[in-house]
């Protein structure tokens, strides 16, 4: 698990449950993801938000197409329960997915926060963004490299607490701005 200054106690909880927590002093979603990726040793790596909105028991379904050689990158397409995904965040995600489709032809419906891929090739993509553009840059670079990218439906549950990204229009706008520069 990558942690870069979270104050919600998730790092301590993850340690108590047996996870190896990688501390990253730089702020940013991408910084935490990259720190976890850089320290990982397994052939296949998975990413997911750990705020209770995603169930880690879904990871095998997301990783299976990668393990079976049917895809190089698999995204969990969120199937949200009522009230789990604020309207502004859902609309922003949909617009980004449509723009991604327009530019690349990829038929993705979600830039999902749960995903799986192989570690060494992912490191080779050279993802530079260390903020909220990380997930989009991963997809763009994977597409450019000719990877097969697919989606697997995953339940998306109401999280406990408020997200600093999707929980506010301002946080969503910041994430969209980070991703927007990648599309320019």
Image (tube, helix red, strand yellow):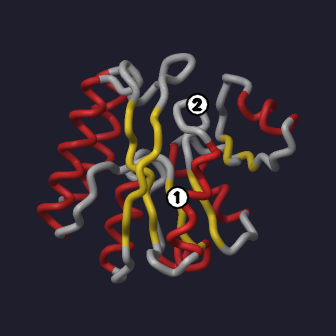
**Which quadrant does the C terminus fall into?**
bottom left
Where's residue 156, x and y in %?
A: 45, 34
Whole-number angstrom distance, CA of label 1 to CA of label 2: 18 Å
Q: Which residue is mark 1?
A: 62
Q: Do residues under tags 1 and 2 come within 8 Å of each other at their CB atoms? A: no
Q: Secondary structure at mark 2?
A: loop
Determine whether, in the image, residue 146 is placed left or right of residue 42: left
Q: Secondary structure at mark 1?
A: helix
The residue lying toward the viewer, choosing from 101 and 37, is 101
Where's residue 163, x and y in %?
A: 48, 24
The residue lying toward the viewer, choosing from 150 and 29, is 150
The residue lying toward the viewer, choosing from 180 and 87, is 87
The residue that appears at 50% across and 56% down in the rendered structure is: 115
Instruction: Relative to 50, say whether 42 is above or below.
Output: below
In front of the other: label 1 or label 2?
1
Instruction: Relative to 176, say whether 182 is above or below.
Output: below
The residue that appears at 50% across and 50% down in the rendered structure is: 114
Instruction: Please identify the quarter of the rendering in which residue 81 is found.
Output: top left
Mark before the other along the chain sequence, 1 or 2: 2
Q: Which residue is mark 2?
A: 51
């Amino acid at each position: 698990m990558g942690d870069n200054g979270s104050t919600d106690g998730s790092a301590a909880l993850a340690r108590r449950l047996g996870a190896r927590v990688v501390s990253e002093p730089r702020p940013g979603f991408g910084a935490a993801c990259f720190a976890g990726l850089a320290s990982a040793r397994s052939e296949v790596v998975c990413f997911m938000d750990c705020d209770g909105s995603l169930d880690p028991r879904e990871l095998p379904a997301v990783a299976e197409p990668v393990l079976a050689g049917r895809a190089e990158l698999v995204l969990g397409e969120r199937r949200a329960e009522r009230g789990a995904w604020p309207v502004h965040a859902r609309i922003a995600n949909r617009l980004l997915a449509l723009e991604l489709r327009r530019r690349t032809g990829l038929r993705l419906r979600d830039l999902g926060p749960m995903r799986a891929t192989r570690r060494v090739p992912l490191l080779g993509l050279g993802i530079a963004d260390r903020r909220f553009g990380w997930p989009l840059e991963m997809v763009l670079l994977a597409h450019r490299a000719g990877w097969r990218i697919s989606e697997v439906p995953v339940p998306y549950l109401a999280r406990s607490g408020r997200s600093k990204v999707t929980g506010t229009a301002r946080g969503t706008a910041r994430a969209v701005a980070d991703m927007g520069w990648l599309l320019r």
